[in-house]
Amino acid sequence: MSQQRQSAFRQRTEKLQERTFEWAARILDLCPRQYPDDPSRSVWRQLIRAAPSASGNLEEADEAFTDHDFLYRMKLVLRETKEARRWLRFLQRCKLARHQDVASLEDEARQLAAIFATIYIKRKQSLQAKHDLERERAKS
């Protein structure tokens, strides 16, 4: 990979990490410090666990030692992002604490999940193609 291409890739990676971090931080900022009811407490606790976990696992994926470790971490990122989106939807649908403030966060979770799914699928396909090519060369 050329130096210029590596630099562009690094910038995209850092932008995505920052976008995910800011999404998780906005969720933490909105989290009520006191809950008006048990359902709000339950859903917010799940949400404030899932969103920062997605951000942290994304940064760990960037530091993966192997392709398989990268795929594992990206699968975790995708799962945690989807989970956070589900909790955001519950907040809105059930009109729980701060429900009026999370619509944009739910949309951001949807967009991030789509990005993470694409990254996962493309990397997995690339690895499979590489593996198939190596297998063909070994047969020759």
Image (spheres, rainbow, N blue to C red):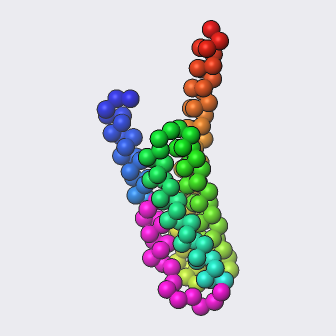
What are the residue bounds of the magenta stretch?
20-38
- Image location (x, y in percent) of residue 37: 63, 89
- Coordinates of residue 137 in the picture (x, y in percent): 59, 14
Residue 77 image point, x, y percent: 55, 55
Is residue 123 shown in magenta?
no
Q: Is residue 80 left or right of residue 65?
A: right
State the predominant SS element of the stretch in magenta.
helix
Q: Is residue 68 above or below residue 83?
A: above
Q: x, y (%) of residue 48?
A: 54, 72
For this orientation, the residue located farthest to the front is 65
Q: Is residue 57 above or below residue 48?
A: above
Q: Is residue 66 above or below residue 135?
A: below
- The residue that appears at 66% across and 83% down in the rendered structure is 39
Which quadrant, please, contains the N terminus?
top left
- Any part of residue 49 in sight: yes
Residue at 62% across / 60% down in the picture? Answer: 82
Residue at (68% x, 80% y) in the render: 94
Image quadrant assignment for residue 9? top left
- Most extreme residue toward the top, as rendered? 140
Q: Residue furthest bottom?
A: 36
Do we see residue 96 in this rendering? no
Locate the C terminus by quadrant: top right
The residue depicted at 45 percent of the width and 71 percent of the height is 26
